[in-house]
Image (cartoon, grey):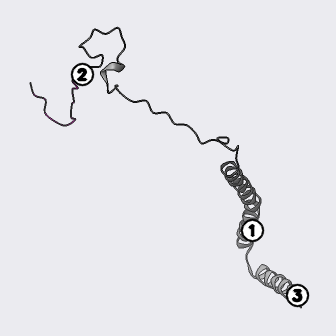
Amino acid sequence: MRKALVAMVLAFAVTLAAIIGTRMSAEAMAVVVGVVCGVAAGIPVSLLILLISNRRGRQAEAATHYPGGRYGAYPPVVVIQGGTPSQDHLAPPYYPAGTTAYEPAQRQFRLVGDYEER
């Protein structure tokens, strides 16, 4: 049954191509052949792109699921340094007593588009 269906579809396609080929002009036939060849040339490139993107996805997935993957067996360590110390006894010993090593500086802000006061 399946072989008969494939044979019928193939016979229909050949008959349709023969009828269209005899009725088309040479220029129209050249356009159809060019389109078919262009699509046929793009298929291998598309399959190659799909293959490469599929491999990248599998490698990234494997690196995050298995121990010893991207970061090893331990999670990454993120260190964020703070600003000024909050207690005076943390200041270095070479500063005189009673003065802080970290005095806040006055900041000057300039707003773009405002008039300058003189």
**Quick one: which residue is furthest to the left in this view?**
118
Instruction: Tell me the residue that label 2 is attached to.
Output: 105
Q: Residue at x 71, y 57 (%)?
A: 54
Check disc 1: other Cα within 10 Å, few if <14, some if 14-19, many if 20+: few
Residue 17 location in percent, x, y? 80, 80
Residue at the image point whose x is 31% and y is 10% from the top: 95
Find disc 3 in the rendering and name its residue: 2
Q: Vertically, is 26 above or below 101?
A: below
Instruction: Kindly state the secondary structure of the residue where label 3 is placed.
Output: helix
Q: Quadrant of residue 97?
A: top left
Q: Residue at x 23, y 13 (%)?
A: 98
Q: Classify residue 37 by image quadrant.
A: bottom right
The amino acid sitting under disc 2 is Ala
Pick the residue in front: 93 or 77. 93
> Is 87 positioned to the left or the right of 10 in the image?
left
| Label 1 – label 2 distance at C-alpha | 73 Å
